[in-house]
Image (cartoon, helix red, strand yellow):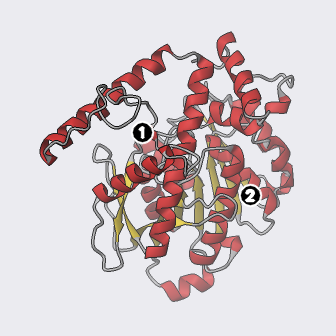
Amino acid sequence: MCCCCPSTISALFCLWMKSGFSKGSVAGALTFFPPDPPLYGFQRLNKDGEILPEEAEEAEEEKTSEEDDEGDLEFDDEDEDETDENFGENGQGPDDGSLIELPQSKAKKVDKKKKDKKKKDKKKKEKKASPSQQLTERARILRQRAKVRNRRDARDAEAGVTYNFAPDPRLACPSLSARVTAEAVKVGPQKKTGTHIAALIYRYQPRNPSSSNKDHPVKTILYSHGNATDIGAMNMMQSVMCRAIGCNVVMYDYSGYGESGGIPLESNTYRDIKLMYKYVVDHVANGVEANVVVYGQSVGSGPSCYIASKEPDIGGLILHSPFTSGMRVLTPSRALACLDIFPNIDRIKKVQCPVMVIHGEQDEEVSVDHGLALHQAVPEELQRDPWWVRGRGHNDITDGPQKMTEYIRRL
């Protein structure tokens, strides 16, 4: 579904009206595409360090879904939103209205077949659905998923659950040195949404901690990733950054991404980074804001410019393949300015910390003109040497040992 197609434009306007003229709903439909399924998981541990089975979590979600079906909750669970065609109108059994009890093993097989059938029926419906229906259905599913996750995370926080990071086995897993540790956490809840944010913290331990803290304190990078990725996919890159530069790296998933709760919306990304910034200052940077460098890649430039414009004591801002604003990526015309998001070009002028811009000269997704405009908008005394990367596009700037070495050196 292309953003320039008449049918898609019509669908966006339809979604805009259905959402009560909410700019955030349209922005969310255009901007945020979290990997599904996520490229990592959080292994849940109880207070004794024992692994909590995944089946228990799935059972809770099914239970929550059943409660939603009874009208006690506002939204249904994602896996239970389709009507079960195997049940009659009374909802008690097959079409003849009877209730048949099956042995447990057979019942599990029947349940699995039903779920498989639901998924197939759902895919067929998605293919037949109009662009407007697809956008509306996607928004509904994300709201349902957010409700389930928020409830689960609230229970986990109350029970003192901790987490282990479990990357997708298909991805390369970094080897940690004696001076680098990794910690998986959930930060929250946010006051307004009740959302907990999933984060992975790489901590760097200097050779001589006492003297390093006084003379050259360890900096912390707060990393906001791009659109169609999550902290599982970015895991290797951030561990390399931590070891090679000798700094802490904290990366997190936006609301609705990975193991984070909530819904992916522009306004929620601002809440996410405000929550994470405070956590990083208090728990990683020893209370010193000047030791925090905010890093935003692609769509991550939005929340990064936002927090840097609000917090005058931030140590620095790095923008990697950034855009001047969300709508300007689609068109330079300001006819749709009422639907624009992430006005980075306006916020960058208010930043009071050093700023470095990195952009590929062959970027076809976000033109290098965006990076040039942002660099020029930074007050001259705060500009740091930009890196306009020859022959590279939007996602391949650090590909290859030569470019990776130069990337680390410039950072």
Kind of residue sitting beneath label 1? Glu
> At 48% from the left edge and 58% from the top edge, which residue is drawn?
241
Q: Quadrant of residue 95?
A: top left
What is the quadrant of residue 402 in the picture?
Answer: top left
Q: Secondary structure at mark 2?
A: helix
Identify which residue is drawn at 61% across, 85% down: 214
Q: Residue at x 44, y 64 (%)?
A: 243
Q: Which residue is mark 2?
A: 307
Where residue 166 appears, as percent x and y from the top left, is 33, 57
Ranked by sequence position, the earlier of labels 1 and 2 is 1
State whether residue 76 appears in this view. Answer: yes
Quickly name the residue at label 1: 80
Structural crowding at the residue carrying mark 1, measured as other residues with C-alpha within 10 Å and reported as few (<14), some (14–19) or many (≥20): some
Of 181 and 199, nearer the camera is 199
Comparing marks 1 and 2, which lies closer to the viewer? 1
Image quadrant in which the N terminus is located: top right
Question: Could you tell me residue 196's position as x and y percent?
Answer: 55, 61
Q: Is residue 220 above or below residue 301?
A: below
Mark 2 burial class by Cα count in 10 Å: few <14, some 14-19, many 20+: many
Name the image quarter holding residue 28: top right
Residue at disc 1, secondary structure: helix
Q: Is residue 327 above or below residue 167?
A: above
Q: Position of residue 16 (x, y in %)?
A: 74, 29
